[in-house]
Amino acid sequence: MTASPVRVVILCVAVLVISASGGILIGKIFEPFESAPEIQAVSALAAPMTTPTVEPITRRETLMPESPFTYNEYPVETPERAKIVPETLPVYEAAPDEPSVEMPAWKRYAALSPPLEGRPLIAIVIDDVGLSHRRVEELIDLPALLTLAFLPYAPALQGKVELVRQSGNEVMLHLPMEPTDHHVDPGPNALLTSLSKEDLRARTIRNLDSFEGYVGVNNHMGSRFTADGEAMAVVMDIMAERGLLFLDSKTTSASTGYRLAIERGMPSVKRDIFFVHVIEEAAILKQLAEVEATAERAGVVIAIGHPHPATIRVLQKWLPEAKKKGFLFVPVSAVPALTFKG
């Protein structure tokens, strides 16, 4: 009996040793399974990354005409611009104690212009742009700096706009407005004199928000709307707030656009020549000869055309010849006639 307690103690110690050994063995057996998720995660991070296969983007040609408007409102006029001495664009520099202000859109998105050098300047604006991707590519391939004005309802606008800006050309928004002829459709969301001020503001904002990267606006049609000073004032207030410039397409001599822009301190200019009244190469060349003569006489000229195939063919030939004659092609934002109050 005296030996029984000793045996009990020995037996207990043996049980404890066997239990501890068994626990270690069991832990080793199950350890790989418990750490498997962590191992897998590390392995995934360590695995070489593979580049996903990217299919080349195939540009789909928009099955729409390059300019759907066989009718246009540009009147045939002889420009009488006063002699303008070309000058470099003013550079705005804030005073040390002046609070920083956001750069207006017409400066922020302006295309880089070459030094003006006192040479006769030509700003070529092609509006009604955006309905055809292929036509945009053809325009930016032309051998001179252009300003392209995009219709706000054209498809896939932002990509086309970025393509134009990356090519070094300038972008404007071609804002649809009511023409005098009520049988002519200026397009979706056009600004109409019949709209209330609230609807007019909403429609203007919708158009201006259709894409980004443009320096300003010129009117698409609008012989009735631009002549209505009260309606135009609503639109010009919104454009002034956004720091945009205004190019008056002058589809009517009664247009109030230029005057209202000047009153609001907006940089603004007026179109001099529309050079595709007749969509034939000989007629276009004749108008471009008038562009040259006006640039020589006045120092600067703004000429507007539409993106017809005939227009592009003529410009392809004419632009290099005009350069040889000493004409300098500039974006609208670099035209010295702009008012620089805004």
Image: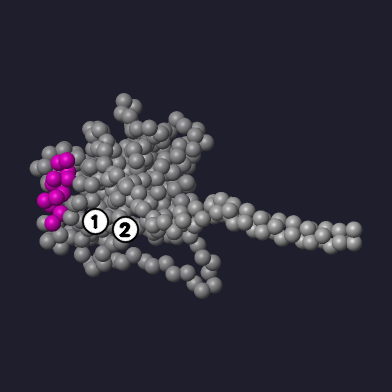
Left or right of residue 173, residue 46 in this image: right
- Compare residues 289 and 253 and report the one nearer the observer: 289
Amino acid tagged 2: Ala
Residue 212 x/y as whole percent: 40, 49
Q: Are marks 2 and 1 in contact (CB under 8 Å)?
A: yes
Q: Residues within 10 Å of mark 2 (few under 14, many from 20)?
A: many
- Compare residues 230 and 72 and report the one nearer the observer: 72
Q: Residues within 10 Å of mark 1 (few under 14, many from 20)?
A: many
| Residue at 22%, 58% in the rendered image | 329
- Residue positioned most to the top: 183
Residue matched to label 1? 145
> What secondary structure prevails in the magenta region?
helix
Residue matched to label 2? 111
Name the quarter where the C terminus is drawn: bottom left
Q: Secondary structure at mark 1?
A: loop
Q: CA distance from mark 2 to mark 1?
A: 9 Å
- Compare residues 92 and 73 and report the one nearer the observer: 92
Magenta-colored span: 309-320
- Mark drawn on residue 36: none
Amino acid tagged 1: Leu
Left or right of residue 333, residue 261 in this image: right
Q: Secondary structure at mark 2?
A: loop
| Residue at 12%, 39% in the rendered image | 280
Name the quarter where the N terminus is drawn: bottom right
